[in-house]
Amino acid sequence: MTRGLGGGWHWWAAGALLAGCHPTSIPDAEAKGDVGWLEENGTPDAVAALGRLADRDPKAIEALRIRTAYDSGAFHAAWMAVTRDAPWGGAMLRAGLADPKTADLAADGMGKHDPHLAAFVEPLEAALVRLSASLQNANIASTLASVGPAGHEVVVRRLSDASTRSAMCRGIASKYGDADARAALYAMPPEARDAAGCVDAVVRLAQQDDWSLGWLATNAEPGMLGAAGKMDVLSCARLHVAWVKALAARPPAQYPALVVPLGYAVVRCPAQVDGILADVIVHMPAARGLVVQAIDPFGRYEEALHATCGNLPLVANGPDSAIVRERASDALIHLCNAPQ
């Protein structure tokens, strides 16, 4: 019996000693260099620990390489290696960007607004061109748009290319797009913004910051203003600001091109636009034709154009052309239900 107890104690002690060799946490596994344990754990923290081990252990690099087929966290570990000047990180990222199946994952794992991105502008651009016909390029475009001045020429080049224009615009409008990329977009000739993704980007940027809103109001193509009125992206409050600025800054020669855009704004946000139209009738006689042409005399506009209706007699009975006066009269009768 004593011998049996003693033998049992030895087996228990050996098991406890063996168990003590296995990691009990991610820091413990990293300290012991246990690549297999971290790989099996697979959490973001474990993958990050694998990245740190990879600086000195080729087995960790191989474990991360396997994960790059499906996990952007492996590429983020490589990015952190880049920030530590560990050569394996840049090699893994370039390989990921060169493969169409992993390029967007690789870009997702990269830092944004980081000086280290300058070294990756060329492979990022090549990846965007390679995937121009794919929808799997959002992370590539947004990463390029976050590079800053070092990526300016590439952003301009991708906007100039019809095949990558929409993707680049979406990257600029993403949460990572920086001021330099936005400036590049606004400085391009109109034909370099002639893509659905660019129209959407300009409107979304106008919702995000006041400078972009001002550019939309005063400098953007009239079609962009029309999209801002039609799309349910720019709030009615900001659409009001845009039209106040637009009517104050744009010359009468542009009024014919503003009729449809203003009409979209009135349809979507009649209450917010009402005061603008009424003020134009009183204070900007040259724009009265723009106002009455933008209004549908038979529309309802949620019965919100009270101030406009109150001032329309100034047009119906004023010195404007017969066509403008007649349209104002029709609006008074049908839209405003006012006696003539």
Image (tube, rainbow, N blue to C red):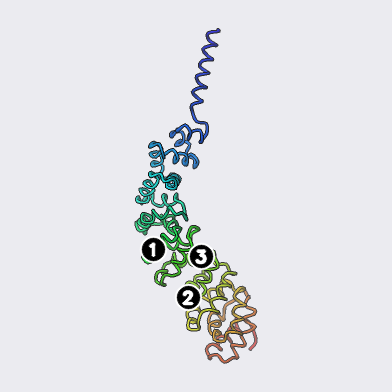
Disc 3: CA contacts within 10 A as few (<14), some (14-19) or many (>=20): many
Q: Which residue corresponds to mark 1?
A: 153
Closer to the chain start, of discs 3 and 2, is: 3
Q: Residue at x 44, y 70 (%)?
A: 187
Q: Position of residue 103 (x, y in %)?
A: 38, 51
Q: Which residue corresponds to mark 2?
A: 222
Q: Residue at x 57, y 76 (%)?
A: 244
Above or below, 273 against 6 in this view is below
The one nearer the camera, 333 or 119, is: 119
At numbered mark 3, what does the secondary structure look like: helix, strand or loop?
helix
Q: Are marks 3 and 2 in contact (CB under 8 Å)?
A: no
Q: Position of residue 118 (x, y in %)?
A: 41, 55
At numbered mark 2, what does the secondary structure look like: helix, strand or loop?
helix
Q: Are marks 2 and 1 in contact (CB under 8 Å)?
A: no
Disc 2: CA contacts within 10 A as few (<14), some (14-19) or many (>=20): many
Above or below, 280 against 40 in this view is below
Tell me which amino acid carries mark 2. Pro
Mark linked to residue 205:
3
At numbered mark 1, what does the secondary structure look like: helix, strand or loop?
helix
Q: Is residue 95 left or right of residue 36?
A: left
Closer to the chain start, of discs 2 and 1, is: 1
Q: Position of residue 177 (x, y in %)?
A: 47, 60
The one nearer the camera, 283 or 301, is: 283
